Image (cartoon, rainbow, N blue to C red):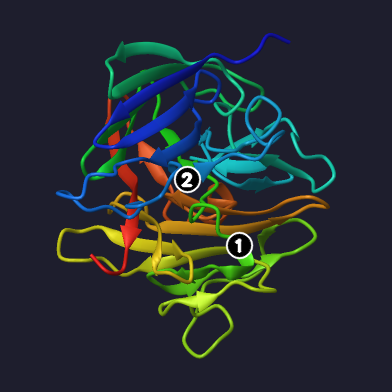
């Protein structure tokens, strides 16, 4: 297997690494020492890490930072009905009995535009086992003074309307602060319980108020283990919801989601030598093709677009 191509872009004091496989965001650093501008990393000798994919988690072996489309999460038993037609997808996670994370995360994407601060990649999703729909996906990663902005589009280039969902799973960091010393704040009012054995929904969404899943105020992550799809995201006046992972000094990373991304899946990864954190913008929950919750339907020729982004955060600014 050949090594995936990686592209580097820079802008606004930020630097990102984007893979040609899965159009994955593998790394994002902030390195602006300007006293005139101020920064979350001012006085730091090293770039401040905001996104870093652990070894072995990046595509094509893992999902780290990759585009998960035309569905995010798992589809139960790889089976669903759409418009009265039965579909049976390949079980890409046979242990859990599911077709997981779509058809794009392990594929090579074509670079269609590239500058010093922006890269755009495109992928044609054609016919696959159980998937008779044709889509064109694009994703643009762009850096500027406000950090990273990621813009996704999906166009139905086939002759028949298609179900659709999309997610991305970046690994976030608050610089070099260990995860157990970080606080998490998620602007979400509900969460969908998952069956732990299969990582699939086992009931409908529930309020997070007065529960262990309430992260509307910053909470320490020490000893916390999460695999939770959140929804009912609380938007600011600009229509974006903002979610933060911060160290004890108030510095950290902010991930914002636009209105097209109504779900946010938080996952802690606990391996023998790794404790990492994924904050995944999604348009729908896992198994949406069966649940019908926030499932998008693209008519022939229809185009969908959505945005999210990441920036350095400092509570003192």
Instruction: Give the side of residue 39 with respect to residue 170, left or right.
Output: left
Q: Residue at x 52, y 71 (%)?
A: 191
x, y percent for residue 290: 58, 51
Q: Residue at x 29, y 42 (%)?
A: 32
Residue at the disc numbered 2: 49
x, y percent for residue 209: 46, 86
Please say if the residues under marks 2 and 1 sit with CB atoms less than 8 Å apart: no
Image position of 8 with respect to 86: above or below: above
x, y percent for residue 44: 40, 50
> Helix or strand or loop: what does disc 1 sit on?
helix
Q: Quadrant of residue 309?
A: top left
**Mark 1 crowdedness (10 Å alpha carbons): few <14, some 14-19, many ≥20:** many
Q: Nearer the viewer, residue 112 or 69?
A: 112
Image position of 18 with respect to 241: above or below: above
x, y percent for residue 175: 49, 52
As drawn, which residue projects farthest toward the bottom? 210
Q: Nearer the viewer, residue 102 or 117?
A: 117
Disc 2 and disc 1: Cα gap in Å?
Answer: 13 Å
Residue at the disc numbered 1: 179
Instruction: Give the side of residue 303 with respect to residue 290, left or right.
Output: left
Image position of 20 with respect to 190: above or below: above
């Amino acid at each position: 297997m050949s090594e995936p191509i990686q592209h580097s872009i820079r802008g606004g004091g930020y630097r990102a690494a984007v893979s040609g496989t899965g159009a994955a965001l593998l790394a994002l650093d902030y390195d602006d020492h300007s006293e005139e501008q101020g920064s979350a990393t001012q006085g730091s000798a090293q770039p401040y890490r905001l996104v870093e994919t652990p070894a072995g988690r990046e595509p094509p072996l893992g999902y780290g930072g990759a585009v998960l489309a035309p569905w995010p999460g798992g589809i139960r038993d790889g089976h669903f009905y759409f418009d009265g037609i039965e579909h049976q997808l390949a079980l890409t996670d046979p242990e859990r009995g599911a077709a997981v994370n779509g058809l794009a995360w392990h594929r090579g994407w074509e670079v269609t535009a590239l500058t010093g601060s922006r890269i755009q990649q495109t992928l044609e999703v054609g016919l696959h086992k159980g998937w008779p729909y044709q889509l064109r996906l694009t994703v643009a990663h762009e850096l500027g003074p406000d950090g990273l902005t990621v813009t996704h589009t999906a166009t139905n280039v086939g002759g028949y309307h298609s179900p659709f969902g999309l997610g991305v799973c970046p690994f976030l960091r608050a610089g070099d602060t260990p995860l157990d010393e970080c606080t998490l704040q998620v602007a979400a009012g509900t969460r969908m319980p998952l069956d732990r054995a299969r990582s699939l929904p086992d009931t409908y969404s529930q309020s997070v108020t007065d529960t262990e899943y309430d992260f509307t105020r910053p909470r320490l992550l020490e000893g916390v283990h999460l695999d939770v799809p959140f929804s009912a995201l609380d938007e600011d006046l600009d229509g974006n919801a903002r979610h933060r992972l911060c160290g004890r000094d108030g510095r950290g990373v902010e991930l914002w989601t636009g209105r097209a991304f109504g779900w946010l899946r938080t996952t802690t990864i606990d391996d023998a030598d790794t404790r990492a954190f994924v904050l995944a913008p999604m348009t729908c929950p896992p198994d949406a093709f069966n649940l019908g919750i926030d499932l998008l339907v693209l008519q022939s020729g229809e185009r969908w677009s959505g945005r999210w982004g990441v920036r350095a955060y400092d509570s003192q600014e």
